[in-house]
Image: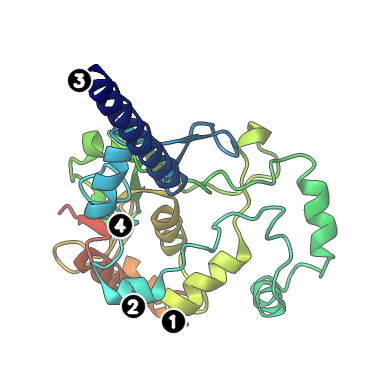
Amino acid sequence: MKCSLRVWFLSVAFLLVFIMSLLFTYSHHSMATLPYLDSGALGGTHRVKLVPGYAGLQRLSKEGLSGKSCTCRRCMGDTGASDWFDSHFDGNISPVWTRENMDLPPDVQRWWMMLQPQFKSHNTNEVLEKLFQIVPGENPYRFRDPHQCRRCAVVGNSGNLRGSGYGQDVDGHNFIMSTYAPVKSFLRVDKEKVQIYNPAFFKYIHDRWTEHHGRYPSTGMLVLFFALHVCDEVNVYGFGADSRGNWHHYWENNRYAGEFRKTGVHDADFEAHIIDMLAKASKIEVYRGN
């Protein structure tokens, strides 16, 4: 009886060892297919493998199901909301000129120089090499954190902005793009924060979005699409005509102020159409005043 009991215990022990071995092999194989969590900052290489039940893995799974690219109520980077937008938008093109995209395609170079015939043709790469020895040559917008919400306000100079009362709303954004000032010969700035607009991005807006309406896109279009490429949520103020259909800047008060629409340099009507399409695609929200 004692011998048979001993044999029974040994058999159970061997069975448990066999089962544990199988479980270990299976779990090791499963771990090899688990996602990694980057724990470093930009450019960090340290990666932590996620284990079953880890909060980060659960969070990633939920995000994968929802398709949200940020924590905003409306995420610009989410796809599938508009076929029109998805067919036009190119998230791979950088809005800023960097060391990586320093070489312009020939068609971009020709178009860019055509817009400024008053300047003599220079070796662009030589100029940029000297420039990037002074200012940063990297793209600060390469990465987006899906666990944050970068809210940007794009503020135009339309007359419909005057008296709108949106000042407090605008100030509540993370970034505000609004400015109009004469270009000075010398500026006192922090050189570490200087960024150079990418001519290829300029042409991308002209080709893909404004579709060659006008000689080149307006400053308002450039800023708007800059925001669409670097922000999670974009809210637009001070674009388009006022409630009476008048096109003018907020500092003007005459019925001839909207004549700039007929110069042919920019196509204000088509650009207004693009803004309406972006709003319908839920990529921006447009706020208009009087």
Q: Secondary structure at mark 3?
A: loop
- For the residues labelled 4 and 2, the Cα–Cα distance comes to 16 Å
Pick the residue in front: 116 or 40: 40
Q: Secondary structure at mark 2?
A: helix
Pick the residue in front: 263 or 205: 205
Decide: marks 1, 2 in contact (CB < 8 A)? yes
265, above or below 223, in the image: below
- For the residues labelled 1 and 4, the Cα–Cα distance comes to 23 Å
Which percent across, then down, holds residue 72?
Answer: 25, 44
Q: Label 2: which residue?
A: 270
In which quarter of the view is residue 54 placed?
top left
Q: Label 3: which residue?
A: 1
Q: Nearer the viewer, mark 1 or mark 2?
A: 1
Q: Label 1: which residue?
A: 211
Residue at left 32%, top 50%? Answer: 69
Q: Label 4: which residue?
A: 158
218 on left or right of 272: right
Q: Nearer the viewer, mark 1 or mark 4?
A: 1
57 on left or right of 125: left
